[in-house]
Amino acid sequence: AQTVTQSQPEMSVQEAETVTLSCTYDTSESNYYLFWYKQPPSRQMILVIRQEAYKQQNATENRFSVNFQKAAKSFSLKISDSQLGDTAMYFCAFHGGSEKLVFGKGMKLTVNP
Amino acid sequence: DTGVSQDPRHKITKRGQNVTFRCDPISEHNRLYWYRQTLGQGPEFLTYFQNEAQLEKSRLLSDRFSAERPKGSFSTLEIQRTEQGDSAMYLCASSLLSAEEDTDTQYFGPGTRLTVL
């Protein structure tokens, strides 16, 4: 069974700083997808970024980018120029042969003014 | 595109009562998922539908839980004889699996928060 581990339960940064959220996963599959979702306080889960395992190029989406290390089974999210609106729970998720998403426990990010 | 909607947003019930939640997916999406999220945890998969067919159910989905997706549109999740351990956020997600892509991205609704007293 796949597992997703987010070892940092909580982080805080100052506005405009860069922050990196870590995620590791365990799978025996070779073809899979990885996602980062954010869940702002009392609001719904929003897709941040998606990475296909067969692609060597790291995904980027505006201020969000990933560092995907397939051999190490590591999938970190970098947020550049942090904004107050980035304050949220961030979840790393794995999507493999089964159609379900397997989520980590999440990490609470607080961006301070 | 109005996004995934869920109703009600909050439900408080007494132990032993039955509750039903509704999810309306993004209109062209053919897949619909239910997840449960407890405090301090990531969402856990419950079940999913492709069109009207329920294709996978988690062991978390005990026989008190039933889900339907008649006509492949909206879905309902019913919990019979609720227990305090059922208190959680119930999330619905939808996706479109197309011939052009080899996987689908799931988009989530706002969730229904259930409190069982």
Image (cartoon, coloured by chain):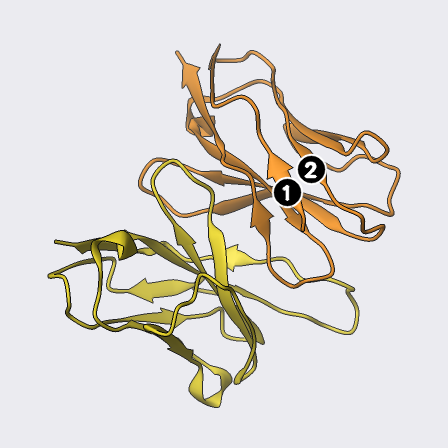
Chain colours: A orange, B yellow
Against B34, residue A13 (above or below) is: above
Residue behind mark 2: A25
Q: Position of residue A95 (x, y in %)?
A: 67, 53
| Viewer-proximal residue among A85 and B10 | B10
Q: For the point 40% across and 48% down, which residue is it? A: A44
Q: For the point 43% across and 87% down, which residue is it? A: B70
Is residue A61 visible to us here? Answer: no
Q: Where is residue B35 in the image (x, y as percent from the top left)?
A: 45, 58
Residue behind mark 1: A3
Residue type, label 1: Thr
- Quadrant in the rendering for residue A20: top right
Q: For the point 57% across and 58% down, which residue is it? A: B106
Q: Position of residue A39 (x, y in %)?
A: 44, 40
Q: Position of residue A111 (x, y in %)?
A: 44, 18
Q: Are marks 2 and 1 in contact (CB under 8 Å)?
A: yes
Could you give the CA–CA distance between mark 2 and mark 1, rounded to whole angstroms? 6 Å
Residue type, label 2: Tyr
- Quadrant in the rendering for residue A61: top right
Taking the view exactly as shown, the residue that stands out farthest to the bottom is B71
Against A30, residue B7 (above or below) is: below
